[in-house]
Image: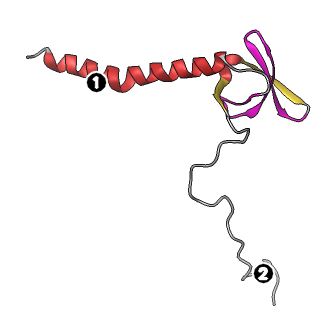
Amino acid sequence: MEFLLPLLLIAVFYFMLIRPQQKQRREIAEVQSTITPGVRVMTSAGLIGTIVAIEGDEVLIEVAPGVTNRYVRRAIMRVLDDGRAPEQTTDEPTTRPVDTADDTTPGTTA
């Protein structure tokens, strides 16, 4: 009976922590091995660009027209399917409405 608790804890750690991380590593390794030129990708640092060329373990990513950066293949974390940047997940608006009710400039009197 005293061996049941440690075995249960080991099983919980395996199924809750170790197994999902292994699955995620396999998926990322598959993405990194199947990339081709012309695919839009996102790096682990959040840079989004199009792969121009693959040279061994390095890739050339075009981040703007005529601007290329060299990255190791392991830096690619995700392939963007539709060619756009990932959408924001928050429901908050990206811009705030402008309050035009108070147009006074500091230091001036009316």
| Nearer the observer, 108 or 88 | 88
Residue, disc 1: 12
> Looking at this rendering, what residue extends furthest in the bottom direction?
110
Q: Quick one: which residue is furthest to the front in this view?
A: 82
**Residue 29, how many percent across, how many down?**
59, 17
**Mark 2 nearby-residue class (10 Å; few <14, some 14–19, many ≥20):** few
Residue extending furthest toward the top: 56
Say few, some or many: other residues with alpha carbon within 10 Å of mark 1 (under 14 / 14 to 19 / 20 or more). Answer: few
Q: Is 107 above or below relative to 8?
A: below
Nearer-N-terminus badge (2/1): 1
Is 23 a magenta residue?
A: no
Judge from the rendering whether residue 81 lies leftward or rightward of residue 23; answer left or right.
right
Q: Is residue 57 magenta?
A: yes
Query: Which quadrant holds the C terminus?
Result: bottom right
Residue 61 location (% of width, % of height): 79, 26
Give SS at disc 2. Answer: loop
On the image, the x and y values in percent for residue 28 come to 58, 22
Q: Which residue is mark 2?
A: 103
The quadrant in which the N terminus is found is: top left
**As shown in the figure, which amino acid type bears the numbered disc 2?**
Asp
Q: Name which residue lies at 39% across and 20% down.
A: 18
Image spot of residue 9 (x, y percent): 24, 22
- Left or right? Give the position of 81 relative to 12: right
Residue visible at 68% across and 34% down in the picture = 80
Residue for point 65% across, 19% down: 32
Which residues, given as a range, are shown in magenta? 39-65
What secondary structure predominates along the stretch shown in magenta? strand
Which image quadrant is residue 64 in?
A: top right
Name the image quarter holding residue 12.
Answer: top left
From this viewpoint, which residue is outermost toward the left? 1
Name the amino acid type tagged 1.
Val
